[in-house]
Amino acid sequence: MKKFEQYAMNKNHPQYSLAIQRQDKLYQRRNDLRSDFGRDYTRIIFSQAYRRLKHKTQVFFAVEDDHICTRSEHVNLVESVSYTIAQELGLNVELTKAIAVGHDLGHAPFGHGGEKILTQIAHEHHLEKFWHEKNSLHFVDSIELLEDNDHCQHNLNLTYAVRDGIISHCGEMNQKYIQKRDFIIDLDEYQYAGQYNPWTYEGCVVKISDKIAYLARDIEDALRLNLLSEKKVDELKEQLNQIGHYQFHAINNGSLVNYFIHDVIENSSVEQGIGLSDEAFQIMKTVMNFNYTNIYLIKRVQIHDKYVSLILDSLFHFLYDYSLENDMIATLKHDLNQYPKLISHYLKWLEKYAYIEKYPRHSKYHNKIIYNFQTDPKALEKSILDYLSGMSDVFIVQSFNELISF
Protein backbone atom coordinates (compact mmCIF):
# COMPACT_ATOMS: atom_id res chain seq x y z
CA MET A 1 0.00 0.00 0.00
CA LYS A 2 1.59 3.26 -1.19
CA LYS A 3 0.46 5.46 1.68
CA PHE A 4 2.09 8.66 0.41
CA GLU A 5 1.29 8.34 -3.30
CA GLN A 6 -0.94 11.40 -3.48
CA TYR A 7 1.71 13.46 -1.64
CA ALA A 8 4.61 12.46 -3.89
CA MET A 9 6.42 15.39 -5.49
CA ASN A 10 5.27 14.48 -8.99
CA LYS A 11 3.80 16.60 -11.77
CA ASN A 12 0.30 16.38 -10.29
CA HIS A 13 1.45 17.79 -6.93
CA PRO A 14 0.07 21.33 -6.40
CA GLN A 15 3.56 22.63 -5.48
CA TYR A 16 5.49 20.84 -8.21
CA SER A 17 6.24 24.08 -10.06
CA LEU A 18 7.92 25.39 -6.89
CA ALA A 19 9.80 22.13 -6.39
CA ILE A 20 11.44 22.29 -9.82
CA GLN A 21 12.36 25.98 -9.67
CA ARG A 22 15.99 26.70 -10.44
CA GLN A 23 18.08 29.76 -9.67
CA ASP A 24 18.66 30.37 -13.38
CA LYS A 25 17.04 29.25 -16.59
CA LEU A 26 18.25 25.80 -17.63
CA TYR A 27 19.10 25.15 -21.25
CA GLN A 28 17.13 22.42 -23.00
CA ARG A 29 18.57 19.70 -25.20
CA ARG A 30 16.54 18.29 -28.03
CA ASN A 31 14.59 15.19 -27.06
CA ASP A 32 15.82 15.15 -23.45
CA LEU A 33 14.38 12.02 -21.86
CA ARG A 34 14.92 13.06 -18.25
CA SER A 35 12.61 14.65 -15.71
CA ASP A 36 13.79 17.72 -13.79
CA PHE A 37 14.91 15.58 -10.87
CA GLY A 38 16.46 13.07 -13.25
CA ARG A 39 18.55 15.89 -14.73
CA ASP A 40 19.65 16.89 -11.23
CA TYR A 41 20.69 13.31 -10.49
CA THR A 42 22.92 13.07 -13.55
CA ARG A 43 24.32 16.57 -12.98
CA ILE A 44 25.41 15.50 -9.52
CA ILE A 45 26.96 12.15 -10.47
CA PHE A 46 28.85 13.83 -13.34
CA SER A 47 30.36 16.37 -10.93
CA GLN A 48 33.96 16.30 -9.74
CA ALA A 49 32.91 16.45 -6.07
CA TYR A 50 30.95 13.22 -6.54
CA ARG A 51 33.99 11.52 -8.06
CA ARG A 52 36.17 12.59 -5.13
CA LEU A 53 33.86 10.90 -2.62
CA LYS A 54 35.55 7.57 -3.38
CA HIS A 55 38.68 8.90 -1.65
CA LYS A 56 36.94 10.63 1.27
CA THR A 57 36.65 9.11 4.72
CA GLN A 58 33.30 8.01 6.07
CA VAL A 59 34.48 7.19 9.60
CA PHE A 60 37.87 5.51 9.25
CA PHE A 61 40.80 6.75 7.17
CA ALA A 62 42.05 3.45 5.70
CA VAL A 63 43.18 4.07 2.14
CA GLU A 64 45.00 0.73 1.94
CA ASP A 65 41.89 -1.33 2.68
CA ASP A 66 39.42 -1.42 -0.21
CA HIS A 67 36.67 -2.80 2.02
CA ILE A 68 36.40 0.04 4.51
CA CYS A 69 33.41 2.27 3.81
CA THR A 70 34.18 5.49 1.97
CA ARG A 71 31.96 8.54 1.60
CA SER A 72 31.12 7.31 -1.91
CA GLU A 73 29.85 3.97 -0.64
CA HIS A 74 27.87 5.75 2.06
CA VAL A 75 25.96 8.00 -0.36
CA ASN A 76 25.22 4.97 -2.54
CA LEU A 77 23.87 3.11 0.51
CA VAL A 78 21.69 6.11 1.35
CA GLU A 79 20.45 6.16 -2.23
CA SER A 80 19.57 2.45 -2.02
CA VAL A 81 17.81 2.65 1.35
CA SER A 82 15.86 5.79 0.44
CA TYR A 83 14.88 4.33 -2.94
CA THR A 84 13.34 1.25 -1.33
CA ILE A 85 11.43 3.24 1.28
CA ALA A 86 10.22 5.86 -1.22
CA GLN A 87 9.17 3.18 -3.72
CA GLU A 88 7.08 1.34 -1.13
CA LEU A 89 5.48 4.54 0.17
CA GLY A 90 4.61 5.78 -3.32
CA LEU A 91 6.99 8.77 -3.32
CA ASN A 92 9.12 10.14 -6.14
CA VAL A 93 12.22 7.93 -6.28
CA GLU A 94 13.97 10.22 -8.78
CA LEU A 95 13.87 12.99 -6.18
CA THR A 96 15.21 10.75 -3.38
CA LYS A 97 17.99 9.50 -5.65
CA ALA A 98 19.12 13.04 -6.50
CA ILE A 99 19.07 14.20 -2.88
CA ALA A 100 20.88 11.08 -1.69
CA VAL A 101 23.81 11.27 -4.11
CA GLY A 102 24.24 14.98 -3.43
CA HIS A 103 23.73 15.12 0.34
CA ASP A 104 27.43 14.81 1.30
CA LEU A 105 29.17 16.51 -1.64
CA GLY A 106 30.48 19.21 0.69
CA HIS A 107 31.62 16.91 3.47
CA ALA A 108 35.07 17.67 4.82
CA PRO A 109 38.02 15.35 4.20
CA PHE A 110 38.69 12.87 7.03
CA GLY A 111 35.01 12.69 7.98
CA HIS A 112 33.65 14.43 11.07
CA GLY A 113 37.16 14.91 12.43
CA GLY A 114 37.97 17.08 9.44
CA GLU A 115 34.68 18.92 9.88
CA LYS A 116 35.63 19.84 13.46
CA ILE A 117 39.01 21.20 12.36
CA LEU A 118 37.55 23.27 9.51
CA THR A 119 35.00 24.65 11.98
CA GLN A 120 37.86 25.74 14.26
CA ILE A 121 39.73 27.37 11.37
CA ALA A 122 36.57 29.22 10.29
CA HIS A 123 36.06 30.46 13.85
CA GLU A 124 39.68 31.64 14.17
CA HIS A 125 39.30 33.71 10.98
CA HIS A 126 35.85 35.10 11.83
CA LEU A 127 34.03 33.20 9.09
CA GLU A 128 30.64 31.53 9.31
CA LYS A 129 30.68 28.16 11.06
CA PHE A 130 31.59 25.26 8.79
CA TRP A 131 28.98 22.51 8.70
CA HIS A 132 28.83 19.97 5.94
CA GLU A 133 25.11 20.19 5.18
CA LYS A 134 25.42 23.86 4.27
CA ASN A 135 28.74 23.26 2.55
CA SER A 136 27.08 20.57 0.41
CA LEU A 137 24.51 23.14 -0.68
CA HIS A 138 27.36 25.61 -1.31
CA PHE A 139 29.10 23.07 -3.52
CA VAL A 140 26.05 22.27 -5.66
CA ASP A 141 25.08 25.95 -5.87
CA SER A 142 28.45 27.62 -6.44
CA ILE A 143 31.41 25.24 -6.73
CA GLU A 144 30.54 22.33 -8.98
CA LEU A 145 30.50 23.10 -12.70
CA LEU A 146 29.33 21.34 -15.84
CA GLU A 147 30.59 21.93 -19.34
CA ASP A 148 28.10 22.72 -22.10
CA ASN A 149 28.29 21.87 -25.79
CA ASP A 150 30.59 24.85 -26.40
CA HIS A 151 33.09 23.87 -23.64
CA CYS A 152 31.82 26.64 -21.37
CA GLN A 153 31.53 26.01 -17.62
CA HIS A 154 28.25 26.64 -15.77
CA ASN A 155 26.94 26.10 -12.24
CA LEU A 156 24.84 22.97 -11.67
CA ASN A 157 21.67 25.04 -11.15
CA LEU A 158 19.66 22.34 -9.34
CA THR A 159 15.98 22.37 -8.44
CA TYR A 160 14.72 23.78 -5.15
CA ALA A 161 13.47 20.40 -3.87
CA VAL A 162 16.88 18.74 -4.35
CA ARG A 163 18.78 21.68 -2.85
CA ASP A 164 16.39 21.71 0.12
CA GLY A 165 16.84 17.97 0.69
CA ILE A 166 20.62 18.35 0.66
CA ILE A 167 20.85 21.09 3.31
CA SER A 168 18.03 19.58 5.41
CA HIS A 169 19.44 16.06 5.60
CA CYS A 170 21.18 16.21 9.02
CA GLY A 171 21.38 12.58 10.15
CA GLU A 172 22.71 13.29 13.62
CA MET A 173 19.37 14.31 15.09
CA ASN A 174 17.34 11.86 17.16
CA GLN A 175 13.88 12.16 15.67
CA LYS A 176 11.30 9.42 15.93
CA TYR A 177 9.21 11.04 13.21
CA ILE A 178 10.24 13.58 10.60
CA GLN A 179 7.29 15.63 9.41
CA LYS A 180 7.94 17.77 6.37
CA ARG A 181 7.64 21.53 6.76
CA ASP A 182 4.89 23.29 4.82
CA PHE A 183 6.64 26.50 3.81
CA ILE A 184 9.29 27.61 1.33
CA ILE A 185 12.38 29.29 2.78
CA ASP A 186 15.44 30.96 1.35
CA LEU A 187 17.96 28.15 1.82
CA ASP A 188 20.81 30.63 2.19
CA GLU A 189 19.24 31.72 5.49
CA TYR A 190 19.84 28.35 7.17
CA GLN A 191 21.77 29.05 10.40
CA TYR A 192 22.60 25.56 11.70
CA ALA A 193 22.24 21.88 10.90
CA GLY A 194 18.76 20.50 11.55
CA GLN A 195 17.18 23.95 11.91
CA TYR A 196 14.34 22.89 9.60
CA ASN A 197 12.85 19.62 8.48
CA PRO A 198 12.90 18.97 4.72
CA TRP A 199 10.19 20.54 2.59
CA THR A 200 9.24 17.25 0.88
CA TYR A 201 8.47 13.77 2.17
CA GLU A 202 11.20 12.57 -0.18
CA GLY A 203 13.68 14.74 1.70
CA CYS A 204 12.44 13.26 4.98
CA VAL A 205 13.03 9.76 3.62
CA VAL A 206 16.63 10.61 2.72
CA LYS A 207 17.18 12.15 6.15
CA ILE A 208 16.14 8.99 8.00
CA SER A 209 17.92 6.78 5.45
CA ASP A 210 21.18 8.61 6.13
CA LYS A 211 21.22 7.27 9.70
CA ILE A 212 19.98 3.81 8.72
CA ALA A 213 22.79 3.50 6.19
CA TYR A 214 25.70 4.15 8.53
CA LEU A 215 24.78 2.59 11.89
CA ALA A 216 25.69 -1.04 11.23
CA ARG A 217 28.15 -0.26 8.45
CA ASP A 218 30.35 1.56 10.96
CA ILE A 219 30.24 -1.50 13.24
CA GLU A 220 31.38 -3.73 10.37
CA ASP A 221 34.32 -1.44 9.67
CA ALA A 222 35.30 -1.28 13.33
CA LEU A 223 35.33 -5.08 13.46
CA ARG A 224 37.47 -5.29 10.34
CA LEU A 225 39.99 -2.83 11.78
CA ASN A 226 40.04 -4.69 15.14
CA LEU A 227 38.62 -1.70 16.99
CA LEU A 228 35.72 -3.88 18.13
CA SER A 229 35.56 -7.50 19.22
CA GLU A 230 32.88 -9.98 18.19
CA LYS A 231 32.15 -10.40 21.89
CA LYS A 232 31.33 -6.71 22.20
CA VAL A 233 28.96 -6.87 19.23
CA ASP A 234 27.31 -9.97 20.69
CA GLU A 235 26.70 -7.97 23.86
CA LEU A 236 24.99 -5.31 21.74
CA LYS A 237 22.86 -8.02 20.11
CA GLU A 238 21.69 -9.27 23.52
CA GLN A 239 20.90 -5.71 24.58
CA LEU A 240 18.83 -5.11 21.44
CA ASN A 241 16.97 -8.39 21.82
CA GLN A 242 15.76 -7.31 25.27
CA ILE A 243 14.12 -4.13 23.94
CA GLY A 244 11.17 -5.51 22.04
CA HIS A 245 9.64 -8.44 20.18
CA TYR A 246 12.08 -8.48 17.28
CA GLN A 247 15.04 -10.83 17.77
CA PHE A 248 18.30 -10.23 15.90
CA HIS A 249 20.37 -13.30 15.02
CA ALA A 250 23.31 -11.15 13.93
CA ILE A 251 24.31 -7.50 14.03
CA ASN A 252 25.47 -6.51 10.59
CA ASN A 253 24.58 -4.07 7.85
CA GLY A 254 22.09 -6.37 6.17
CA SER A 255 20.12 -7.25 9.30
CA LEU A 256 19.83 -3.72 10.68
CA VAL A 257 19.11 -2.04 7.34
CA ASN A 258 16.40 -4.60 6.55
CA TYR A 259 14.84 -4.15 10.01
CA PHE A 260 14.74 -0.36 9.84
CA ILE A 261 13.49 -0.22 6.24
CA HIS A 262 10.50 -2.44 7.05
CA ASP A 263 9.78 -0.51 10.23
CA VAL A 264 9.84 2.88 8.47
CA ILE A 265 7.54 1.64 5.72
CA GLU A 266 5.08 0.16 8.24
CA ASN A 267 5.04 3.04 10.73
CA SER A 268 5.26 6.16 8.54
CA SER A 269 2.04 8.07 8.05
CA VAL A 270 0.92 11.32 6.50
CA GLU A 271 -0.33 12.45 9.92
CA GLN A 272 2.95 11.86 11.76
CA GLY A 273 5.54 11.84 8.98
CA ILE A 274 8.38 9.50 8.06
CA GLY A 275 9.35 7.60 11.18
CA LEU A 276 9.82 4.59 13.40
CA SER A 277 7.94 2.50 15.93
CA ASP A 278 8.75 2.91 19.62
CA GLU A 279 10.77 -0.30 19.52
CA ALA A 280 12.78 0.66 16.41
CA PHE A 281 13.46 4.14 17.74
CA GLN A 282 14.82 2.67 20.97
CA ILE A 283 16.95 0.20 19.00
CA MET A 284 18.33 3.02 16.85
CA LYS A 285 19.27 5.08 19.91
CA THR A 286 20.88 2.04 21.54
CA VAL A 287 23.03 1.32 18.48
CA MET A 288 23.97 4.98 18.19
CA ASN A 289 25.05 5.11 21.84
CA PHE A 290 27.05 1.92 21.33
CA ASN A 291 28.81 3.42 18.31
CA TYR A 292 29.71 6.63 20.12
CA THR A 293 31.09 4.75 23.13
CA ASN A 294 32.97 2.07 21.23
CA ILE A 295 33.84 3.69 17.89
CA TYR A 296 33.49 7.44 17.44
CA LEU A 297 34.98 8.59 20.76
CA ILE A 298 37.73 6.04 21.33
CA LYS A 299 41.35 7.08 21.86
CA ARG A 300 42.59 6.00 18.42
CA VAL A 301 40.02 8.19 16.71
CA GLN A 302 40.98 11.12 18.94
CA ILE A 303 44.66 10.65 18.04
CA HIS A 304 43.71 10.61 14.37
CA ASP A 305 41.86 13.89 14.87
CA LYS A 306 45.13 15.47 16.06
CA TYR A 307 46.84 14.20 12.91
CA VAL A 308 44.06 15.71 10.81
CA SER A 309 44.39 19.00 12.69
CA LEU A 310 48.10 19.16 11.90
CA ILE A 311 47.49 18.57 8.19
CA LEU A 312 44.58 20.99 7.72
CA ASP A 313 46.10 23.75 9.84
CA SER A 314 49.44 23.47 8.02
CA LEU A 315 47.89 23.62 4.56
CA PHE A 316 45.58 26.49 5.47
CA HIS A 317 48.33 28.66 6.91
CA PHE A 318 50.76 27.80 4.13
CA LEU A 319 48.36 29.29 1.57
CA TYR A 320 47.17 32.06 3.88
CA ASP A 321 50.72 33.37 4.31
CA TYR A 322 50.76 34.34 0.63
CA SER A 323 48.45 37.21 1.54
CA LEU A 324 51.54 38.95 2.96
CA GLU A 325 52.99 39.28 -0.54
CA ASN A 326 52.47 42.39 -2.67
CA ASP A 327 51.37 40.24 -5.60
CA MET A 328 49.97 37.01 -4.21
CA ILE A 329 49.33 35.35 -7.59
CA ALA A 330 52.77 36.16 -8.95
CA THR A 331 54.40 34.73 -5.83
CA LEU A 332 52.29 31.58 -6.01
CA LYS A 333 53.36 31.10 -9.63
CA HIS A 334 56.97 31.67 -8.62
CA ASP A 335 56.72 28.82 -6.06
CA LEU A 336 54.84 26.51 -8.41
CA ASN A 337 57.82 24.29 -9.19
CA GLN A 338 58.51 23.74 -5.52
CA TYR A 339 54.92 22.83 -4.61
CA PRO A 340 53.39 21.74 -7.95
CA LYS A 341 50.44 19.77 -6.62
CA LEU A 342 49.06 22.15 -3.99
CA ILE A 343 49.74 25.46 -5.72
CA SER A 344 48.75 24.45 -9.26
CA HIS A 345 45.33 23.24 -8.13
CA TYR A 346 44.80 26.28 -5.91
CA LEU A 347 45.61 28.61 -8.82
CA LYS A 348 43.06 26.74 -10.96
CA TRP A 349 40.57 27.10 -8.10
CA LEU A 350 41.06 30.88 -8.07
CA GLU A 351 40.82 31.04 -11.83
CA LYS A 352 37.38 29.42 -11.69
CA TYR A 353 35.84 31.27 -8.77
CA ALA A 354 37.74 34.48 -7.99
CA TYR A 355 37.82 38.04 -9.23
CA ILE A 356 41.37 39.41 -8.96
CA GLU A 357 41.86 42.64 -10.85
CA LYS A 358 45.19 41.92 -12.56
CA TYR A 359 44.27 38.33 -13.44
CA PRO A 360 41.06 38.06 -15.50
CA ARG A 361 39.26 34.73 -15.72
CA HIS A 362 39.19 32.63 -18.85
CA SER A 363 36.16 33.31 -21.03
CA LYS A 364 35.01 29.69 -20.72
CA TYR A 365 33.93 30.26 -17.10
CA HIS A 366 30.29 31.38 -17.03
CA ASN A 367 29.76 30.44 -13.38
CA LYS A 368 29.23 32.88 -10.53
CA ILE A 369 32.20 34.57 -8.87
CA ILE A 370 32.50 33.54 -5.20
CA TYR A 371 35.62 35.36 -4.02
CA ASN A 372 35.90 39.02 -4.96
CA PHE A 373 39.36 40.03 -3.79
CA GLN A 374 38.62 43.70 -4.51
CA THR A 375 35.55 44.04 -2.29
CA ASP A 376 35.64 41.15 0.22
CA PRO A 377 38.42 41.31 2.87
CA LYS A 378 37.78 37.64 3.67
CA ALA A 379 37.98 36.38 0.08
CA LEU A 380 41.32 34.64 0.61
CA GLU A 381 40.25 32.80 3.76
CA LYS A 382 36.99 31.69 2.15
CA SER A 383 38.77 30.43 -0.96
CA ILE A 384 41.25 28.36 1.06
CA LEU A 385 38.55 26.88 3.32
CA ASP A 386 36.45 25.87 0.31
CA TYR A 387 39.52 24.47 -1.46
CA LEU A 388 40.44 22.32 1.54
CA SER A 389 36.88 21.15 2.19
CA GLY A 390 36.59 19.85 -1.35
CA MET A 391 39.81 17.84 -1.28
CA SER A 392 39.86 14.07 -1.05
CA ASP A 393 41.80 12.54 1.83
CA VAL A 394 44.36 11.11 -0.57
CA PHE A 395 45.02 14.45 -2.27
CA ILE A 396 45.25 16.34 0.99
CA VAL A 397 47.85 13.91 2.38
CA GLN A 398 49.82 14.16 -0.85
CA SER A 399 49.71 17.96 -0.62
CA PHE A 400 50.87 17.89 3.00
CA ASN A 401 53.72 15.53 2.15
CA GLU A 402 54.73 17.97 -0.57
CA LEU A 403 55.14 20.67 2.08
CA ILE A 404 57.41 18.59 4.31
CA SER A 405 59.50 16.93 1.61
CA PHE A 406 63.09 18.00 0.99
Image (spheres, rainbow, N blue to C red):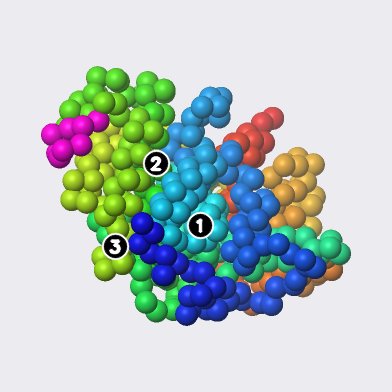
Against 391, residue 125 (above or below) is: below
Q: Secondary structure at mark 1?
A: helix
Residue 402 vs residue 94, the one in the foreground: 94
User: Is 242 in the magenta?
Assistant: yes
The residue depicted at 35 percent of the width and 46 percent of the height is: 261
- Figure disc tally: 3
Residue 44 in picture, x, y percent from top left = 62, 56
For disc 2, the marked residue is 214
Could you say which disc has been placed on residue 93 in the image?
1
Give the mark nearer the N terminus: 3 vs 1: 1
Question: Given the image, on which type of amino acid does mark 2 rest?
Answer: Tyr
Amino acid residing under circle 1: Val
Give x and y (percent) for residue 337.
79, 42
Q: CA distance from mark 1 to mark 2?
A: 20 Å
Mark nearest the camera among 1 and 2 is: 1
Note whether residue 345 is visible. Answer: yes
Q: Where is residue 281 shown, x and y percent of the image? A: 23, 49
Amino acid type for the residue under numbered disc 3: Ser
Magenta highlight range: 240-248
Judged from the image, the secondary structure of the residue bearing numbered disc 2 is: helix
Left or right, 239 with respect to 153, comes to left
The question of residue 244 being in magenta is answered with yes
The residue to which callout 3 is attached is 269
Residue displayed at 16% across by 38% down: 245
Instruction: Find the distance from the CA under tag 3 to the CA under tag 1.
Output: 18 Å
Rendered view: 115 above or below 242: below
Dot 3 lies on which element? loop
